[in-house]
Amino acid sequence: MQSIRKDLEEFQGQLKDGTIVRAYRSLISYMMGLQSHFKKKYTNSSVSALYQGYMDMTYFAISTPLLKEHNLKCAIVFNYESFFFEAWLAGRNRSVNRQYWELLKDQKLSKYRVVTPAKGIDSIVECDLVKDFNLNEADALTESIEVGTKAFIEDIEGVLRKVQAN
């Protein structure tokens, strides 16, 4: 295993090159703008602050009135490992995640991934939003993310309403 010292030396060298810094700033700047867009457009929902993460994920969450009623939120995530945008249904805490995983694991959610609870897993259901993107076309990217997020939330809320009715 490589030592942390060597890792830090490599990291420093990569930062000096400037490419990583420019790319990271661009992603964070885009996510800040996206968060602001959702905050302005969806005034009936609450939108959280931006969580920058540890270069694993950067996200903000949206809670519609129905999601909030269930202690749930929809996180719009930039996943650094897969290097694309996702929407995650998540609970207020791990207990809520487990409760809703039990409720949703047998539902027909074929467009989405129901994620089994485990250490380090923050989502209940995941949805791929945009895999191939260009930050130079930010308006088109924002529209794609918004359309996908809206459909994801509507589908999840439909399932919640159906389950509530039973």
Image (tube, rainbow, N blue to C red):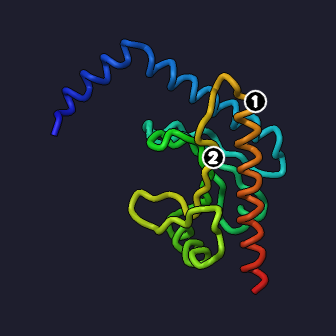
Question: Where residue 142 sits in the image (x, y, percent)?
Answer: 73, 36
Describe residue 142's horizontal placement relative to residue 92 as left or right: right
- Looking at the image, the residue that sits furthest to the bottom is 166
Sequence-earlier tag: 2 or 1: 2
The mark lying in front, picked from 2 and 1, is: 1
**Mark 2 packing: few (<14 Cα in 10 Å), some, or many (20+)?**
many
Mark number, residue 15: none
Question: Where residue 46 sits in the image (x, y, percent)?
Answer: 74, 49
Picture residue at 31% right of the left edge, 24% below the top = 11
Mark number, residue 139: 1
Callout 2 secondary element: strand
- The relative height of residue 18 versus residue 117 in the rendered view (above or below) is above
Picture residue at 69% right of the left edge, 37% below the top = 35
Marker count (numbered): 2
- The relative height of residue 105 versus residue 20 in the rendered view (above or below) is below
On-image quarter of the N terminus: top left
Q: Are marks 2 and 1 in contact (CB under 8 Å)?
A: no
Picture residue at 20% right of the left edge, 26% below the top = 6
Q: Amino acid at mark 2?
A: Ile
- The relative height of residue 2 versus residue 20 in the rendered view (above or below) is below
On-image quarter of the C terminus: bottom right
Callout 1 secondary element: helix
Picture residue at 70% right of the left edge, 34% below the top = 141
Question: Where residue 100 sits in the image (x, y, percent)?
Answer: 59, 72
Question: Where residue 13 sits in the image (x, y, percent)?
Answer: 30, 16
Q: Amino acid at mark 1?
A: Asp
In-front residue for pair 20/4: 20
- When asked about the image quadrant of residue 143, the answer is top right
Mark number, residue 76: 2
- When asked about the image quadrant of residue 162, the answer is bottom right
- Measure how far apart labels 2 and 1 are at the Cα level: 16 Å
